[in-house]
Amino acid sequence: MSIADDAIEVKGARAHNLKNIDVTIPREKLVVITGLSGSGKSSLAFDTIYAEGQRRYIETFSAYARQFLGSLERPDVDKIDGLSPVIAIEQKTTSKSPRSTVGTITEIYDFLRLLFARAADAYSYETGEKMVSYSDEQIKELILKSYQGKKINILSPKIRSRKGHYRELFEQIAKQGFVKVRTDGEIVDLEKGMKLDRYKTHDIEIVIDRLKIDKTKDNEKRLMESINTAMYHGDDVLMIIDQETNETRYFSRNLMCPSSGISYPNPEPNNFSFNSPKGACPNCNGIGELYVVNEKKIVPDVTLSIKNGALAPHGPEKKSWIFKQFQTIAQRFDFSLSDPWKDIPEEAKQIILFGGKDSFEVESKLLGVKRNYNIDFEGVANFIESQYKSNSTSLVRWAKEYMDKVPCSVCEGSRLRKESLNFKVDGKNIAEIVNMDITELGEWLEGLNDRISEKQKKISEEIIKEIKARTQFLLDVGLTYLSLNRSSKSLSGGEAQRIRLATQIGSQLVGVLYILDEPSIGLHQRDNEKLINSLVSLRDVGNSVIVVEHDKDMIERSDHVIDIGPFAGKHGGEIISEGTPKDLLKHNTLTAEYLNGKKKIEIPKTRRKGNGKKITLKGCTGNNLKNVNVEFPLGKMIGVTGVSGSGKSTLINETLYPILNAHYFNGVKKPMPYKSISGLEHIDKVIDINQSPIGRTPRSNPATYTKTFDEIRKLFAQIPEAMIRGYKPGRFSFNVAGGRCETCHGGGLRVIEMNFLPDVYVECETCQGKRFNRETLEIRYKGKSISDVLDMTINEAVNFFEHIPKIHRKLKTIKDVGLGYITLGQQSTTLSGGEAQRIKLASELSKRDTGNTFYILDEPTTGLHFEDIRVLMKVLNKLVDKGNTVLIIEHNLDVIKTVDHIIDIGYEGGKGGGKVVAKGTPEEIVKDKKSHTAKFLIKELN
């Protein structure tokens, strides 16, 4: 067996900061690539191995097909041997479309739709009875049996409860040769020019035949013909009236309610899809939510008058048509525009907000003549609605400021038509099933075959098998708490990645190379075990698995570890050790020192006592929270822990943060339901650092993201030479015409299009990659031009700008979080996940703290190595020592063991969570025998 058969050989990899490295990766093994954040792990795994695998796949297409796909660049590597087809499961979150849900990504929803279309029982939405459908022969037999010897009328329903005069319809019916119709329960002869009251609702049926039922051959033949005719004119529905008792009965070829006669079309899978007009609720178009105008946002302050800007969308009085309309309405209802809104008559408020028409006359006292006034006003609220429906993004954004998102009143958030919701399997409709969490769904599927009829069992056997298998994969990767209707844009990076992992495991491929990017993000230690087992099972079927990871358990369970370092950025990019996890421990590397205990993140000798003040939040019931009361002691570092899906984000990001943000900064996001909050006077601002990625465009860089570049440009504009030339800060921006090089539009690179080969980027020959034109580069500060400043590393820039406090403070924070090695102008697209996360942290942490600031951090250790976490904790501890409060939502035990106060939420995820199960110092938490966090924390503290 040659090397290429059992290993992937990479020769001369130079992507980003890799230093021309050679590496051999064993196949069909679980391989972990680890190292400091920014050392080059992703450059090797994604930008070299995955990029080459992807490129080779696209190379197999014809040149004609490739020109539509866009070609991929050949990664900067000499050669790669032994590469199998590659699938990357990255952290980039899934689709942001409101129509994408967990069910649609995993394709479980597609199978559920099929199950309901083929095996569900239909029920009437009017009476709740089971729907029936008959063949023409069955209908004939039923009529002969039920009406033997009786006189009946056979009718075709045409119109049901609709307004109109229907003159054309009656003419059309007469032309077809019919002589009688039944309108609103009464049989009448058709006459020329006949019509009904157009403002009332009517029922109209055509009288097809009137006959006495007996079992003669002729009678049966006539009955069969009448049934056919009635079905043809009544859209597969007919109506029988007993002439003696006047009782009616309906029969239909489709699904039909035997009492009320409503019928459903025969179900198809797209009748259950909220992305198809056949299944989507007509009111919300299948989104489940609507934007509705909120009067309180239109008139936030009822003590103001219209003249002084009571109507927020229009502001204070100005000379415009709309204020003339308000003036006319004021005359009509006898009030003044200077009156407070609360004193205006109710009827006038209704017209101002929701529009109306009115005309009135006013007598002029001076001239003694009467003048007519007309009010024809759309209404402020209706105007906002119409702008929301327009095609302009800026108008829609403006309209949303005065609207609230509410569940659709028609489908109550289920997204489907009422007909679709009345198909049931085992007594449940499809909306109830997608609302279950995955654990419940698994339990429901377990005994489903025993609870359905034989016929249903036969039809649905394969479908149920497929749904069960896919549900099991979601359970295996620890996503027990999600429900299928959870919108994919609300998923964290780790969750989205594990869903894609579950989908991949479900595809049962063999001989594939899977590359994963930190799949353990957002996973509690307890679920980590499940995740590692899923990866091991992927390997055991015959796949190669490469994982970029910092997690201790993952490193210890792997077959082969590659450690990249020794440091980050340009000081990294070399392989410093490789081999089995045991071999790794013998090397003298940072990773090895943390694994074998030579280095560790120290547990503080004493826990901070705090300042004795606290914020108390009571009665939180959002999502799965069960009436939670919780206290946040101030002046401490607080850790919020618990298994995935237990309700940490709901409590902090969806309840606490929106309350604080609304209180200090008038934020508009509505918090989840809660009863009361106290203690807000003890802090004076809140800073939230969430998980949203930083802008990843080639024009964004650390200097622009942290807003340092704005200050640097202002500084350059104040240099005497720049002032003489009249340069403003905009002159020093590479995004605006004026100071930038116009050949490359400030990019520093030029693209040469190669049609069906990948585009080639070359240095711009006009500015030599400096991004600015000659005149701009002539302005120098301490001998450096603006381009030289962008090429400085953060470490150099901290010293260079030490006398400019505004710039120095921001750069110092970036240096403190351990990013001294990156340059100010490095493209954001080339930053690793952990670097981007820390740039964001630095940008928020550099805001002036007041000593009473409340920081909220959501999993700040994403993408960080043990050493990076130590550096980060040092920065956070400094903040707390100044009197601020830092709250961290975290699973990482290195962080949890160093906090002063833990709030543990659990015990399980989803419906089994939502309670505070333990609170106190780490030492107090470990005494709780039931808490999952305690079991793992106790090992760390000992």
Image: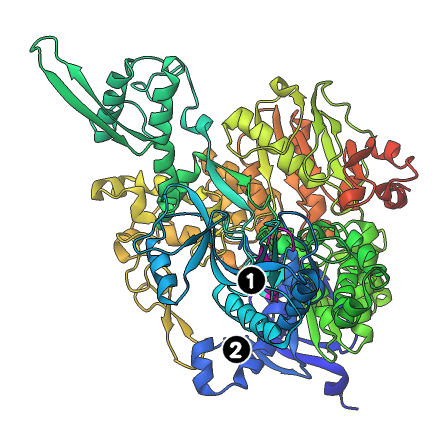
Provide the residue designation for mark 1: 237
Q: Residues within 10 Å of mark 1 (few under 14, many from 20)?
A: many
Q: Residue at x 64, y 53 (%)?
A: 421
The residue nearer to you, when weighing 345 against 209, is 209
Residue at x-position 64% and y-position 79%: 11
- Identify the element where label 1 is drawn: strand
As displayed, is residue 471 above or below residue 64?
Answer: above
Q: Residue at x 45, y 42 (%)?
A: 707
Label the magenta part by its dominant secondary structure.
loop
Q: Is residue 593 left or right of residue 661?
A: right
Q: Amino acid at mark 2?
A: Arg
Q: Which one is nearer the viewer's eye here, 560 or 336?
A: 336
Crowd rating for badge 2 (residues with CA inside 10 Å; few <14, some 14–19, many 20+): some
Secondary structure state at the residue bearing disc 2? loop
From where the camera sits, is residue 272 visible?
no
The nearer-to-camera label among 1 and 2 is 1
The boundaries of the magenta stretch are: 258-269
> Farthest residue in the top direction?
365
Find disc 2 in the rendering and name its residue: 74
| Residue 45 locus on image (x, y percent) | 65, 69
